[in-house]
């Protein structure tokens, strides 16, 4: 076999060794970050108002909830599952939270409720996937119908208004920075560290990479699947807080195809749909990239109606690159 | 043999029960007028579900059907009104472009080995995006009288589209149940490798089912546009859910290799009966979506339970 | 750094680290193991021998905690244990390197060595620096300085992956290491290196269970050998006091002629003529001829290119150069369908995966390769289908409830008969049989051999691939030996002996081990 690489000892070139590792591990994330910068530079040159503080704040903080939801979705996809119901879930959680907020309950209850309910509802999906062995795609499709239909039937399409100002988390500021932005950065960093540095976080990659081998090294795969769905539900709850408190009212509908946007953020951020790779940093950056693209289309006078087509193309290209890369690697492995 | 069709038998009993209960509850239900109307309402979903039975039985899935329907509707309006084509030509072109969308799905699945789930999730976004981009939120109205007949007219007392559906059903039953292509689909769904090693045309069959799926979605779009006399880019949103539910409820294994057209038809009937029953009972459309979701999950639970018992 | 407990100086060197008593295991009605005994001492290499289907894999899985024995006891380190899962076996100090390696392709070498059991820093976080340093030290200890611990496992060769898995076993402080056919997929040079590693581990006091078919390896490294036959314990012998012939006699338990009745057939005109066929690295410039009524054996080590040659002839991996002629007519074979139309049939190596659609009925499997003939205009003639299925069923003597029984429920031998029936229905001129009797019980095995003789008598040209040398020698009129993708030797029946064939199998690899100048 001639395909061995000669590893230079670290002592000789510690900097290049570390740099190489970072590039190998975070290459995709750096690529997405680069794409954001290029987009800002190019569109900012065409129309400087695009990069104005005002627009940037509204773009990033208005879409931070997608980045937060994409964190949970990243974990789901890393373990080779998917959740199509997350958009509907966010809608339901928003209504739960808003209803509690206007009922006069303490505001922390209104904030905690979506996180707890999100974890609970999503665990049901997790149990059906892990223990009943039904593919997550269909379970979550069914779940989506139940949540979506349930929400409209219960609320009758009515909006919740007169939300107490203390409830409007997304409008608050920390150290002069908009709350959603701070949350997005803090939650992404925390989740990234957890997935990289904890045994539990690492086990998600093992399960997604080779479930049989993960079982053989003693990881309780089924229980982990349920746990990951619960965590994902909690992140959907956190995303709800940022989403539902932006305006004075809570509608009983969510943006169309919200789940698709969230999944796409994860996929374009480098989370492989074939399982076992990808980071939350990539997913969050991809959410930022989308938000920036969506806004940029307006500033360069392209109809925003094309945005979704663009997203579709991006999904296909990213997955295509992933499929091709794996093929190449397997071939290089001498099969 | 009885064992093989037990799912269909249970479903047939269920459908009969649902219809009987509804007939007892409401005198309007079992009237020819209502039944014909129900047939009209279920045609679009049913057409797509027939082909989806092939797709799922071959071990695949097509999430993009709703988007192909929306794109086809938009294209029909664009070809006819914006580009001034004769309507029959526009209809043919729409069927052609629907088939092309399906062919593209097949291409990325076969040629690049992309998992069907994610490939069609991508094209779901792409085709819907194209529909939105092309229509720019404008709808097309003012369809000629003869065109409206497709979705609103009747022939020999039966709605025109139900005739189309019946013809499609007959073709689907014959192909899936009695032809070598149907057998090929089952073989691929059970073991793609073994099918390939037996010299069966695996790639061609996959291209065919996804192309047919796109074609069915665009045919459904024409009927839908004719029925509601307008085009909108969000037409067919969520169609994939209704279709997959009907197919899975009808006994087609989500893992491939098993499923029948009769089962799918029974699944469609049960869902339609439940929906119309609920609406007669005064429950609005959104409640029925919940029901579809519950029915989908329960069916899967029951069938995976039955399968694991059969294996043990 | 200490990698494994140093037990060499321990007075208990002869006390078994692992001891099995009267282990039986049955799967439904099939008794896979019956009253098997097995002892492993620390610091010994203990070979586990037996023909295919003798129960070696089942025993390995019992040891690994993947199968629970139906009866019998296992003792590890002197105390009785019961393994409920692979995890329990690991906890008892047993590590297994399976044939299909259980690794995480998308993760680095270092992470795979630790796989879920990471060293933590004081803050409870994974100490990645330590992970990498220890992985590097472990691999260095296995004499694998050339392995980059930051490389992705998916990009490594099989030999390298195997070392990663061994390093993982050592990292778990395994006292018992089970290697299941570790050299089966390795080239000679890599196999050599693996044997060195095994000997190093033995010196360190690890008890090693070594499963392999390669006689020369077994005699080079093992201290004792235990032989299984048809799921039963035959005996345990000292390597030093045993000859190869003794061992084969223990494994086979009968003379070769009894097992493989050779039927003489009239050998006719050439059916298959292949010239300069190439496809990928493992089919290089192959030239061969198979005549009507002739059985040509294709011998070679696993991974030598035997199956790849068959796959090229059958159109799964079409040839990139060279010619194939059937009955003197040149044919182009770009797909299995084209191969079938040319008169080539292939009974594949992996019966359950490639040969059969298991959930489908016998009838549907037998008709699968001739669906187009059975459906003029597209509509299947069910009557014709039933007729040919019943005919094939009867002709091959398939034992089943009827042609409607799903093939997944049949025994290996009956499944193989269904595959053969399917291909005979295409009325082939050339039948390629890839490991035709693998995993089949002895009775069905001789039936398959008898069938092969009959088919040859009827003028069919047969190309048979087999890992069982006795089978190749007994059944073939001529033996072709494949090594490293090339046909290394052609031996007529009279000249084909275990020595000549074995020599040809390894000759090429021997000469190329030093310099792989070949493109």
Image (cartoon, grey):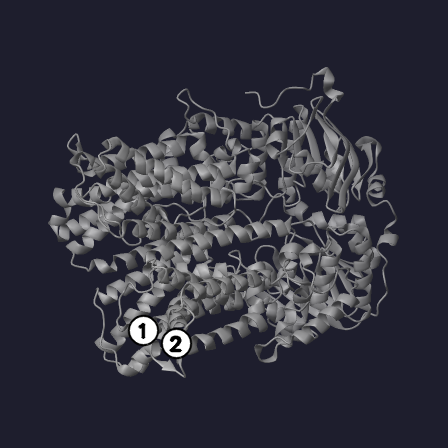
Q: In which quarter of the image is residue B268?
A: bottom left
Question: Circle 1 is placed at which residue position?
Answer: B227
Count residues near mark 1 (Cα–Cα under 10 Å), then give few for <14, some for 14-19, many for 20+: some
Is residue A202 at all visible to an observer of this figure? yes
> Is residue A309 left or right of B157 when viewed as pictured?
left
Mark 1 falls within which chain? B
Q: Quadrant of residue B273?
A: bottom left
Q: Quadrant of the N terminus of chain C?
A: top right
Q: Nearer the viewer, residue B136 or B154?
A: B154
Q: Distance between the residues labelled 1 and 2?
A: 9 Å
Q: Residue at x 70, y 33 (%)?
A: C209
**Do the CB atoms of the residues marked 1 and 2 lie less than 8 Å apart?**
yes
Q: Nearer the viewer, residue C457 or A303?
A: A303
Question: Circle 2 is placed at which residue position?
Answer: B161
Residue C234: image location, x then y, percent: 83, 38
Q: How many labels does the image show?
A: 2
Mark number, residue C176: none
Seen in the picture, residue B152 relative to C435 is either above or below; the reply is below
Seen in the picture, residue A207 relative to C172 is either above or below; the reply is below
């Amino acid at each position: 076999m001639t395909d061995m690489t000669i590893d230079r000892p670290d002592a000789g070139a510690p900097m290049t060794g570390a740099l190489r590792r970072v590039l190998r591990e975070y290459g995709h994330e750096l690529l997405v970050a680069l794409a954001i910068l290029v987009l800002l530079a190019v569109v900012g040159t065409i129309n400087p108002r695009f990069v104005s503080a005002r627009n940037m704040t509204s773009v990033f903080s208005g879409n931070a909830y997608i980045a937060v939801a994409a964190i949970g979705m990243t974990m789901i996809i890393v373990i080779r599952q998917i959740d199509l119901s997350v958009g509907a879930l966010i809608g339901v959680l928003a209504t739960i939270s808003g209803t509690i907020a206007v009922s006069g309950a303490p505001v922390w209850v209104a904030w905690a409720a979506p996180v707890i309910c999100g974890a609970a509802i999503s665990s049901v999906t997790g149990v059906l996937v892990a223990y009943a062995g039904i593919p997550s795609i269909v379970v979550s499709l069914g779940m989506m119908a139940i949540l979506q239909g349930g929400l409209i039937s219960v609320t009758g399409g009515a909006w919740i208004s007169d939300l107490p100002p203390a409830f409007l988390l997304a409008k608050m500021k920390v150290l002069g920075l908009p709350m959603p932005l701070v949350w997005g950065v803090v939650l992404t960093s925390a989740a990234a560290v957890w997935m990289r540095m904890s045994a539990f976080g690492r086990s998600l990659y093992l399960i997604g990479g080779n479930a049989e081998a993960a079982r053989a090294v003693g990881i309780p795969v089924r229980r982990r699947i349920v746990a990951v769905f619960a965590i994902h539900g909690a992140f959907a709850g956190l995303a709800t807080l940022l989403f539902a408190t932006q305006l004075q009212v809570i509608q009983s509908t969510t943006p169309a195809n919200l789940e698709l946007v969230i999944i796409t953020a994860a996929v374009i951020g480098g989370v492989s749909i074939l399982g076992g790779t990808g980071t939350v940093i990539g997913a969050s950056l991809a959410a930022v990239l989308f938000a920036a693209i969506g806004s940029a289309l307006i500033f360069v006078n392209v109809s925003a109606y094309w945005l979704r087509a663009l997203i579709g193309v991006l999904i296909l290209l990213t997955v295509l690159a992933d499929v091709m890369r794996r093929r190449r690697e397997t071939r290089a492995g001498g099969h | 043999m009885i064992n093989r069709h037990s799912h269909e038998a249970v479903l047939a009993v269920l459908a009969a029960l649902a219809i009987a209960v509804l007939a007892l509850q409401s005198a309007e239900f079992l009237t020819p007028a209502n039944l014909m109307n129900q047939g009209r309402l279920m045609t679009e979903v049913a057409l797509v579900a027939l082909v989806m039975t092939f797709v799922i039985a071959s071990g695949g899935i097509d999430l993009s059907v709703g988007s192909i329907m929306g794109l086809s509707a938009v294209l029909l309006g664009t070809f006819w009104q914006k580009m001034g084509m004769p309507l029959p030509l526009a209809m043919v072109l729409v069927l052609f472009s629907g088939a092309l969308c399906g062919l593209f799905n097949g291409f990325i699945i076969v040629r690049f080995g992309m998992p069907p789930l994610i490939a069609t999730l991508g094209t779901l976004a792409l085709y819907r995006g194209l529909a939105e981009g092309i229509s720019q939120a404008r709808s097309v109205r003012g369809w000629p009288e003869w065109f409206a007949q497709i979705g609103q007219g009747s022939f020999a007392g039966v709605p025109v589209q139900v005739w189309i559906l019946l013809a499609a059903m007959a073709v689907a039953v014959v192909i899936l149940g009695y032809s070598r292509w149907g057998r090929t689909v089952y073989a691929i769904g059970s073991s793609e490798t073994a099918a390939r090693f037996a010299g069966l045309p695996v790639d061609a069959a996959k291209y065919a089912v996804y192309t047919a799926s796109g074609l069915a979605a665009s045919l459904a779009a024409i009927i839908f546009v004719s029925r509601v006399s307008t085009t909108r880019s969000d037409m067919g949103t969520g169609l994939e859910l209704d279709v997959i539910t009907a197919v899975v409820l009808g006994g087609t294994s989500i893992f491939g290799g098993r499923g029948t057209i009769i089962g799918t038809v029974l699944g469609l009937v049960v869902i339609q009966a439940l929906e119309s029953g609920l609406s007669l009972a005064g429950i609005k459309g959104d409640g029925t979506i919940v029901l579809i979701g519950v029915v989908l999950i329960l069916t899967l639970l029951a069938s995976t339970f039955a399968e694991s018992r059969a294996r043990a | 750094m200490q990698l494994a407990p140093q037990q060499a100086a321990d007075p208990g060197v002869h006390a078994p680290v692992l001891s099995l008593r009267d282990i039986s295991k049955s799967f439904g009605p099939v008794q896979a193991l019956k009253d098997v005994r097995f002892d492993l001492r620390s610091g010994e290499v203990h070979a586990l021998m037996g023909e295919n289907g003798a129960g070696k894999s089942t025993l390995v899985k019992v040891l690994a905690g993947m199968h629970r024995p139906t009866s019998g006891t296992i003792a590890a380190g002197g105390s009785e244990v019961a393994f409920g899962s692979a995890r329990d076996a690991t906890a008892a100090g047993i590590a297994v390197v399976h044939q299909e390696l259980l690794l995480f392709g998308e993760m680095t070498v270092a992470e795979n060595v630790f796989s879920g059991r990471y060293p933590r820093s004081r803050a409870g976080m994974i100490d990645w620096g330590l992970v990498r340093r220890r992985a590097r030290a472990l691999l260095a200890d296995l004499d694998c300085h050339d392995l980059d611990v930051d490389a992705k496992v998916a990009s490594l060769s099989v030999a390298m992956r195997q070392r990663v898995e061994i390093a993982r076993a050592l990292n778990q402080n395994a006292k018992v290491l089970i290697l299941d056919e570790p050299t089966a997929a390795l080239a000679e040079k890599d196999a050599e290196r693996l044997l060195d590693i095994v000997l190093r581990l033995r010196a360190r006091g690890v008890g090693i269970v070594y499963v392999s078919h390669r006689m020369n390896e077994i005699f080079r490294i093992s201290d004792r050998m235990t032989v299984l036959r048809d799921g039963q314990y035959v005996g345990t012998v000292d390597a030093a006091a045993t000859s190869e012939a003794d061992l084969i006699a223990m494994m086979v338990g009968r003379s070769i002629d009894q097992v493989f009745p050779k039927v003489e057939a009239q050998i006719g005109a050439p059916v298959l003529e292949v010239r300069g066929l190439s496809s990928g690295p493992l089919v290089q410039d192959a030239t061969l001829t198979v005549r009507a009524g002739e059985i040509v054996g294709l011998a070679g080590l696993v991974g030598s290119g035997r199956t790849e040659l068959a796959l090229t002839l059958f159109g799964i991996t079409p040839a990139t150069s060279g010619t194939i002629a059937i009955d003197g007519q040149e044919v182009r074979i770009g797909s299995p369908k084209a191969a079938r139309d040319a008169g080539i049939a292939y009974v594949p190596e992996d019966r359950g995966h490639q040969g059969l659609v298991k959930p489908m009925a016998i009838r549907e499997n037998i008709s699968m390769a001739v669906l187009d003939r059975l459906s003029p205009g597209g509509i299947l003639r069910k009557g014709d289908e039933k007729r040919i299925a019943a005919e094939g069923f009867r002709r091959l003597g398939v034992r089943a409830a009827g042609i409607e029984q799903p093939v997944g429920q049949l025994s290996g031998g009956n499944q193989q008969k269904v595959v053969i029936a399917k291909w005979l229905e295409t009325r082939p001129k050339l039948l390629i049989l890839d490991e035709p009797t693998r995993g089949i019980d002895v009775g069905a095995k001789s039936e398959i051999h008898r069938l092969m003789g009959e088919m040859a008598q009827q003028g069919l040209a047969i190309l048979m691939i087999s890992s069982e040398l006795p089978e190749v020698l007994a059944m073939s009129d001529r033996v072709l030996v494949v090594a490293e993708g090339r046909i290394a030797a052609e031996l007529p029946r009279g000249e084909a002996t275990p020595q000549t064939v074995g020599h040809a199998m390894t000759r090429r690899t021997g000469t190329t081990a030093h310099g792989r100048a070949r493109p």
